[in-house]
Amino acid sequence: MKQNVNKPTLQDVARKAGVSTATVSRCLNFPDQVAGRTQEKVNNAVRELGYSPDFGAKAMAARRTNTIGAIIPTMANALFARGLQAFQEELQLHGFTTLVASTSYSSETEEQQIRSLVARGADGLLLIGHERDPEIYRFLETQGVPVLISWVYDTAATRPSVGFDNAAAMKEIANEVISLGHRQIALISAELEFNDRATARLHGIQDAMSEAGLDASNLQVVETYYGIDEGAVAFDELMKTAKPPTAVLCGNDVLAVGALRRARELDIKVPEQVSIIGFDDLDLARATFPALTTVLVPHREMGKQAAIALASKVKDDAPIQSYELKTKLVFRDTLGPVL
Amino acid sequence: MKQNVNKPTLQDVARKAGVSTATVSRCLNFPDQVAGRTQEKVNNAVRELGYSPDFGAKAMAARRTNTIGAIIPTMANALFARGLQAFQEELQLHGFTTLVASTSYSSETEEQQIRSLVARGADGLLLIGHERDPEIYRFLETQGVPVLISWVYDTAATRPSVGFDNAAAMKEIANEVISLGHRQIALISAELEFNDRATARLHGIQDAMSEAGLDASNLQVVETYYGIDEGAVAFDELMKTAKPPTAVLCGNDVLAVGALRRARELDIKVPEQVSIIGFDDLDLARATFPALTTVLVPHREMGKQAAIALASKVKDDAPIQSYELKTKLVFRDTLGPVL
DNA sequence: TTGTATGCGTTATCAA
DNA sequence: TTGATAACGCATACAA
């Protein structure tokens, strides 16, 4: 590669304005320390040259980047987008830029992304879920990069987190399902490995069932990727088993929408023949027909609180306070009693 | 802020391994140029110290970052996510990292993001649509950062692009609508200012109508943000007008899903009473009931081709070839004849 | 195969 | 209020 155009540097601006580089730097960062006339000269030079400071050089000299990294499993659906948006907006208020990376639910990719963001000088990191190789946590410690875990709140965890109790949320809706007479229950879940949210949700159902005296064999679990089509396929699978479930709980709304679509294609009435329950309460959940019964997760609030916690940690080295958000059942039209 | 932990540097590694910094650098970047025993010593030191190279310093010294920036209007829905994912995957194959930023459809924010990514050393940039302040294009030229425009293909444009003909795509579906007898037509569009895709789609409809001898007054246009709820509100508005449309074209599937939801809430039969047409053919379009008639945009292929074009431009300074992708009408269940 | 020395673009310290 | 200059962490041309 050749870089045939040379980006203007502080030097160039200084030369053009007839001042020193130090003055230009000050003029850009602390304008009040510079005389009005000098400011003008500098600003003109900056404009004429189309100067833009080099981030790398700046980071190196200033020893901080005002950048926070966020690593989420996927951008392919609205699952994380909503919370992330709020996270980003709040951080901007605090003067931080957010760098986003996604992992496609691969712990290997996540590790790469973590290293990449740290290398890029992220002053702090937002990660989803606790579960990952201890080696990574060690790495982050030696690098001195503060981390905040989100999308989960687990009192048993050693690290601070801003999120909700995945197990309790799922247990709550499972209790409703059971109280409506459902005995054959299924869960369409994300892959469980390295996904403590998904695992916790499964445990929530198992808890509810065992408390209701239901045998574990009454629960069928299908693990799949997140996606509408995947939800449809999983639903198909479940309906073909010897004892098809009368209630299908889904790890998220996207999967539930897929299940709902396939139910319609198979001419299975929802909720008369099968109940389908989502998780997250995305916009999507109200767009289907029948509208999806689901669990509301306050994503925006979660993103905002995570941003506040991380910003104050990075700026003032304040210890991160864990913060629990409450989920809420949203009853719409896809959950009904067993007939 | 205090950084109480000091990140290990090349120096530290070199000292620990008992070699020079140059050797460490080589060992990390060109392992074959280093003796086996030396490699071991260095790698051990790297591991023990948890060393990770400083991106800023690296970029400054190497004068390139292997980073491509992509700036999209929003991450809040799947509209851009699908194409971006493919873009990113392809770039990774070519050894590039992708940095993503979003603008919330604000041209001001877009300018900030462009400057930010350039400052961060992006070797190239992917931008959506042609229309923006000429000043920005000048800036990018003085910075020597190659730009590729996507999501549009416009033979009239001076800059190379990888995308599709928005006007033609919308015109094609509008022709179908008109041939089914629709005379009162509406468009629920994104805001038109600084959005040449939305503008082109509007023109496509206008073209089709004028060719069919329909007066412009038969077309109602509602501009709104992208979102399911926004689509619902816009549909509401349209149905309250003196001459409600019999066909509602939407700038994208997300708006169409919202319109569809509101139609159901208002007990308006689709497509018997009103036809609703989407754009993009997201997964979403098959999840609704009735399933959405829409225009397929090959997002993944578009992202991939954009990545290929941009990568070869950055690596080999090859001129960017514009590339046109074809859209396709997808007839499902929301478009019918006027009864 | 390895080491030395220099420069990358910026900030920040110290003088003037 | 300004200027000279020393870091910052790394890559690389050149020497050994």
Image (cartoon, coloured by chain):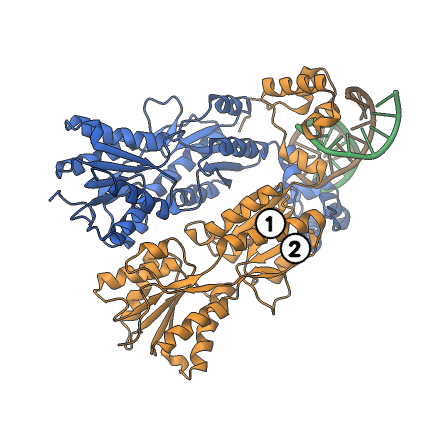
Chain colours: A blue, B orange, C brown, D green
CA–CA distance in space, label 1 to label 2? 9 Å
* Image quarter of residue A143: top right
In the image, A46: left or right of A198?
right
Q: Residue at x 53, y 34 (%)?
A: A113
Count of numbered tags: 2
Q: Which mark is residue A231?
A: none
Q: Are marks 1 and 2 in contact (CB under 8 Å)?
A: yes
Secondary structure beneath dot 2 equals helix
Is residue A31 shown to the viewer in this render?
no
Task: Find residue A176 and report its image quarter.
Answer: top left
**Chain identifier of the residue bearing label 1 in the image:** B
- Residue A138 visible to the viewer: yes
Establish whether labels 1 and 2 are both on one chain.
Answer: yes
- Identify which residue is drawn at 52% across, 65% down: B196
Residue depicted at x 67% and y 46%:
A35
Give coordinates of residue A181: x percent, y percent: 12, 38
The numbered disc on residue B139 is 2
Place of residue B276 in the rendered image (x, y in percent of width and height, measured from the top left): 33, 66
Quadrant of residue B96 in the image?
Answer: top right
Q: Chain of mark 2?
A: B
Q: Please, what is the three-letter code of the amino acid marked with disc 1?
A: Arg
Report the quarter where the C terminus of chain A lies. Answer: top left
- Counting from the top left corner in percent of width and height, residue B17 is at 69, 16
The label on residue B115 is 1
SS for dot 1: helix
- Of residues B175 and B242, the one drawn nearer to the viewer in this rendering: B175
Q: Amino acid at mark 2?
A: Phe
B264 or B104: which is nearer to us?
Answer: B264
Nearer to the camera, A184 or B168: A184
Binning the other alpha carbons within 10 Å of mark 1 as few (below 14), some (14 to 19) or many (20 upward) gives some
